[in-house]
Structure formats: C-alpha cells, structure tokens
Image (cartoon, rainbow, N blue to C red):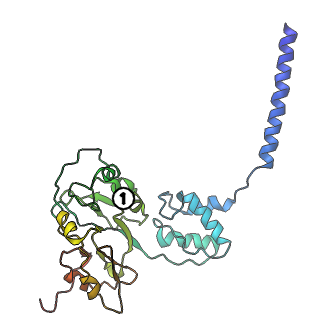
Amino acid sequence: MSLTILFSVITLGILAILFASILYGAAKKFAVEEDPRIDEVTELLPGANCGGCGFPGCRGFAEALVGASESGDLGTLACPPGGADTMAKVGEYFGIETKAPEPKVAVLRCGGSCGNAPAKTKYEGPSSCAVAHSLFAGESGCPSGCLGLGDCVSACTFGALSINSETGLPEVNEEKCTACGACVTDCPRKLFELRPTGRKGRRVWVNCQNVEKGAASRKSCTVSCIGCGKCVKTCPEKISAITLENNLAYIDPAKCIACGLCINVCPTGAISATFEPPQRKNA
C-alpha cells in the first residue's frame, strides 16, 4: 500500500515538472516584449482614461504616441484633458516639436428649455436619456430635443456638466470642460458638439437639431430651426459659413468669423452665441 502511494506521488511529481517545463518554454518562446517607452509616456499623461483622444485609455494613447514617434511626427494626436502642456511634455520626451491643439469646448445644440418646449406628456420611466430616447420623442414631443435626464452629466468625469433646474437643460462649465467628447458619445440624440472655443470666446451655433419641417418643429419648440435659410443668405458670401440641409441650418466653426449677423435675422431665435449680437442698422 505504501509503495502504491509512493509510486503515485513520484508519478504526479514527474508530470508536474514536465508540464511546468512545457509552460515555461512556451512562455519564453511566445513572450511579447513591450516597449518600455509606453509606460514612461503613460506617466506623462493625466491618467483620466476618458477616451477623448480616441484611444482606449491613457495607455492606449501612449502606445499610439510611441508608434507615431517612429515617423518623427505625432500628427494630429492630442490629449484633450492634458491640453498643450501635456503634449509639450510628450514632444519633449520624444524630441519632437508638437503643435498646440486648437482649444475646444462642448456645446449643447438644443434650446428646448421648459419654457421654449413645454412638456405635453409625463415620462415616468427610468431616469436615463438612452432609455427614454428608445421609448418616445420626449415630453415636449420634439424627436431631436434634449431629454434632460442627465446621461451627459453622468458621462462627464470632470464635473463640467450639470442640469439647470429652471431650464431643464444641461449646462457646460467651460473652465472644467476638457473637450474629451464623452458627452458627445453618450448623448443618444447627438446634441453635443465639440466646437473651437473661438477668438476671445466668441462662438455662434444653431441651437437646434430638429430636421422636421418648420411647422412641425414649431409645434414642439418655439426656438427650433425652421429651415427658412435667412441665416444662409445673411452670412457674407466670402465667408459662407452656414449651410442648410434637411430643414436644418449648420454653422461651420472653421469658417464662421462670429460676426453675429445671422443671429438677428433668425425668426425663431434658433441661433445662439456667447456674445451680444450686433444691433440691426434699421432697428
């Protein structure tokens, strides 16, 4: 009996050593050596893991930076939360000159506040924009309007978004916004856009995403874009920053000079700006 146990122990021991040797050899043969620079570059990043750079977390961005550095050009790679300072550190690490990315900020493109777009129904489901969006057009009836349930607020890890209790709409704290794009991704109605902060903070944008025809869109919101095209005609020909498609105007931030002329001609007040628009000459 004792010999049987001894034989079993010896056999199992030999098998254990054999399999351990096989696993060790396989690990050595197929081991992937990681570039040590990835860890070092990751240390230079803010560690927000917000995905605003377009990569899965800071480590994924570090891998992309290491790969891009091989060509001597970091291209358009940028870290929204870290901004120019972080990219300068990364550029110094690689010995590559970097260009400061154009500062941007998240902009809500909906003016459907409680006053402008009164509720016609009462939603009593889960407090989630994604869920509400899948169920109905919204309490105001606008199929493109903000649902105000705060998915964007939950997505923002920088505390830059909050729901205004009076308007029912999210507000962006520009000082905290890093333009990571999390709100752009998580808003089921794609109401957020990352737009350049603009010269001296001057920005103009169409505060609506409703593509319904004018009469239909006005039924649910008094400040909706009705696609009349007056803003397009008013925009200086040399600038041509405004286009009209599917009953909805869009102001190209790359072309817009923030003159504000389009604001006064909009019959519904669907165009918003960060400054007081110029008065009409005949006003």
Quarter placement of the N terminus: top right
**Helix, strand or loop at mark 1:** loop
Single out the residue that lies furthest toward the left.
Answer: 283
Tell me if mark 1 has few (under 14), some (14-19) or many (20+) residues whose alpha carbon lies within 10 angstroms of its own.
many
Residue 165: quarter of image = bottom left
Q: Residue at x 50, y 67 (%)?
A: 79
- In the depicted view, which residue is nearer to us: 94 or 76? 76
| Residue 75, horizontal then vertical, whole percent | 58, 75
Q: Is residue 80 left or right of residue 276?
A: right
Q: Residue at x 19, y 70 (%)?
A: 215
| Residue 113, horizontal then vertical, whole percent | 20, 62
- In the depicted view, which residue is nearer to us: 19 or 90? 19
| Residue 264, horizontal then vertical, whole percent | 19, 82
Q: Is residue 139 above or below residue 247?
A: above
Q: Is residue 92 left or right of residue 112?
A: right
Q: How many marks?
A: 1
Q: Residue at x 34, y 86 (%)?
A: 257
Residue 162: quarter of image = bottom left
- In the depicted view, which residue is nearer to us: 281 or 34? 281
Q: Residue at x 48, y 75 (%)?
A: 101
Question: Residue flagged by tag 1: what amino acid is it?
Answer: Cys
| Residue 271, horizontal then vertical, whole percent | 25, 76
**Residue hosting label 1:** 187
Q: Is residue 217 left or right of residue 174?
A: left
Residue 146: quarter of image = bottom left
Q: Is residue 74 above or below residue 117?
A: below
Quarter placement of the C terminus: bottom left
